[in-house]
Amino acid sequence: MNPRNLLIDGIGNIYLIDFSEMKDEEKGTRFLDMVRLEAETKFKLAVLDSQSLDAFIAMEQLLIEARTLEDINRIRSLPLEAEARKMIAAVCALRQVARQISTEPADDPALDYEYKLGLLAQTLRISLFGNYLTEVEQEYAVVSSALLTDWLIQHG
């Protein structure tokens, strides 16, 4: 065990990871771990109030529409406020890791769909049971779920 095996989110939650010892059958599980980490990280790092909600919803739409690693990197390069930049950097990094550990090609549309389906499940769980969310963060989670649902219907 070494420090490279620890991920710490914005509120101090620690996640233990170890990609180097992963077996092929565990890659699906690790892929879903990245989905769960993205959902948790996104809602814990997003510093929201009623005035910033629209901007975060616009960023959420961009994240949902991102289909390739190139799209993800474009979002990462946008001029953003410090809090939004941290959240976007974490989300983009997790998506890149998820694509790298998958057995499918990184820009496979089926992989993107599977990722977003998992993200919807996690986002719904957070919106329903995330008792740590403020009212505005809860609204963000519900809108995010609706946007993901709409995207999945259009691309399913």
Image (tube, rainbow, N blue to C red):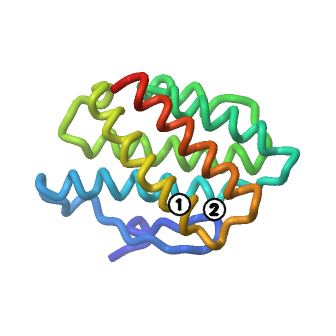
Nearer the observer, 118 or 47: 118
Apparent side of residue 118 relative to residue 150 in the rendered image (left or right): left
Q: Amino acid at mark 2?
A: Lys
> Are discs 1 and 2 less than 8 Å apart at CB?
yes
Q: Which mark is residue 95?
A: none
Residue identifier under label 2: 44
What residue sits 69% from the left and 38% below the top? 57
Near mark 1 (Cα within 10 A), the count class, few <14, some 14-19 or many ≥20, is: some
The residue type indicated by label 1 comes to Glu
- For this view, does 60 lie left or right of residue 70? right
Residue under the image location 49 percent in, 52 percent down = 38
**Residue that label 1 marks:** 40
Position in image of residue 67 (x %, y %): 43, 26
**Which residue is at the front of the view, 4 or 123?**
123
x and y percentages locating residue 128 in the rendered image:
55, 63
SS category of the residue bearing label 2: helix
